[in-house]
Amino acid sequence: MKSYQEILDYLYSQLPMYQRTGAAAYKNTLGNTLVLDELYGHPHRFFKTIHVAGTNGKGSVSHMLASVLQESGCKVGLYTSPHLIDFRERIRVNGQMITEQAVIDFVGDFERQNKKMGLEPSFFEITVAMAFWYFQQMKVDVAVIEVGLGGRLDSTNIIMPNLSLITNISLDHTALLGDSISLIAAEKAGIIKLKVPVIISESNAKYNSIFVEKAKEEDAPIYFADEEYTAGYSMLLPIGQQRFNFHKDGKLYLEGLQTDLLGAYQRQNIGGVLKAFELLMEQGWSITLENIYKGLSKVRENTGLRGRWEIVGANPMVVCDTGHNEAGIRHLVTQIRQTAWKELYMVIGMVNDKSLDHVLALLPAEAHYIFTQASIPRALDAHEFAQKAAMFGLNGIVVPNVKDAVDKALQDANSNDLVFVGGSTFVVADYFS
């Protein structure tokens, strides 16, 4: 029997992996996923599911949903991607990562069976099959399933969920999903299923009609959460939480709602979550407002989520965030502007298959930049990144190793400065590892 490390080596080196190699690992068909699903007896049919897609915020929303469901007494599976440090972060039950032995058992069984089939799955296809299998083994009541990429052809899209939620749409992965908002929205709309209610967290005239049309085709009730749930601002608390007053249809609904996920942008995510629980309660799920209050205040504790405006140091303040596309960076820059600092240090790196111009145009020109690169093949060369950034008036130094780059920022920064680490999920992952 292979060791856990040998299994990881197989997953990472023998299977095409989008997070590391990019488009070469992307499959534009559900063929392998359907074969794997049949091989393991359609495990996703044995528990309820909630499907979450979107360009930004889907990870935060998935963890919020899972946390509240845990507080309601459900045994909750949670599938998300990518991971930051440990592969097992992708598959959790009530916040606990899948065991190493379960990973060994599943991959070993697949390899044995595959000697006859000769299937050539991607890393993501195997991981999704493993998640569904594990959730059945653990007899979960419900699983929150985050889409990996797009929606229509994503391996997670074989489920028939009780509820679908799409956070927002912006330009990202354009080489695979399309180079316009409408094309990307059409891919995300692919998770809308027959008669399954769908929530759109953030309405937008650029894509609303696409979702409405798809929902009409599927006879699926559709709801735009931000037309019902609003919170004008957030208050940052000394205990590492932020507080919102949420209104529903213009009237105060949830006063003093707190979450341990920081960043003012979470209010858009929470609106979609609140609408989701409203609909689930209408379906007869046993969820109370107390569960919602408690679950949202303990997302990180209950689910292990990291890297969302996470404060990891003080004097100077050090913040990590995995936001990496135009819309995500726009939210981050707004949050940076709302944070007190004397000097700003940006330790930043990106991947090499993103369109940089729109992102670079958003970044603060007054910051001290330390350009770096994550330890994956997809990482954009730090020197190339610095050259492109200079064209937008963003100047600094190059330190290719992420941890060395952060150390350099900490050497230069004073106690009342801000050090930001991000630009890519993988930069944050290298910092945490």
Image (cartoon, grey):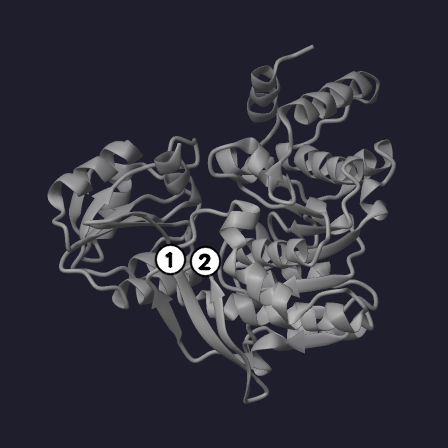
Left or right relative to 394: residue 107: right
Residue situated in front as seen by the camera: 274 or 260: 260
Q: Residue 16 placed where, x, y %? A: 60, 30
The amino acid sitting under disc 1 is Gly
Q: Give the spatial CA distance, label 1 vs label 2.
A: 6 Å
Neighbourhood count class around disc 1 (C-alpha, 10 Å): few under 14, some 14–19, many 20 upward = few
Dot 2 corresponds to which residue?
Answer: 260
Dot 1 corresponds to which residue?
Answer: 240
Quadrant including the C terminus: top left
Residue lying at 38% horizontally and 35% vertically, measured from the top left: 430
Res 173 seen here: no
Asked whether disc 1 touches disc 2, contact meaning CB atoms under 8 Å apart, the reply is: yes
Q: Image quadrant of residue 294?
A: bottom right
Q: Secondary structure at mark 1?
A: loop
The amino acid sitting under disc 2 is Asp
Whether residue 157 is situated above or below residue 374 in the rendered picture = below
Left or right relative to 321: residue 39: right
Left or right relative to 399: residue 422: right
Res 225 seen here: yes
Q: Earlier in the sequence, mark 1 or mark 2?
A: 1
Residue situated in front as seen by the camera: 98 or 164: 98
Residue lying at 69% horizontally and 32% vertically, measured from the top left: 126
Neighbourhood count class around disc 2 (C-alpha, 10 Å): few under 14, some 14–19, many 20 upward = many
Residue lying at 73% horizontally and 19% vertically, measured from the top left: 108
Q: Residue 159 placed where, x, y %? A: 78, 51
Quadrant including the N terminus: top right
Q: How many marks?
A: 2
Q: Secondary structure at mark 2?
A: loop
Q: Residue 209 placed where, x, y %? A: 65, 77
Whether residue 140 is situated above or below residue 296 in the rendered picture = above
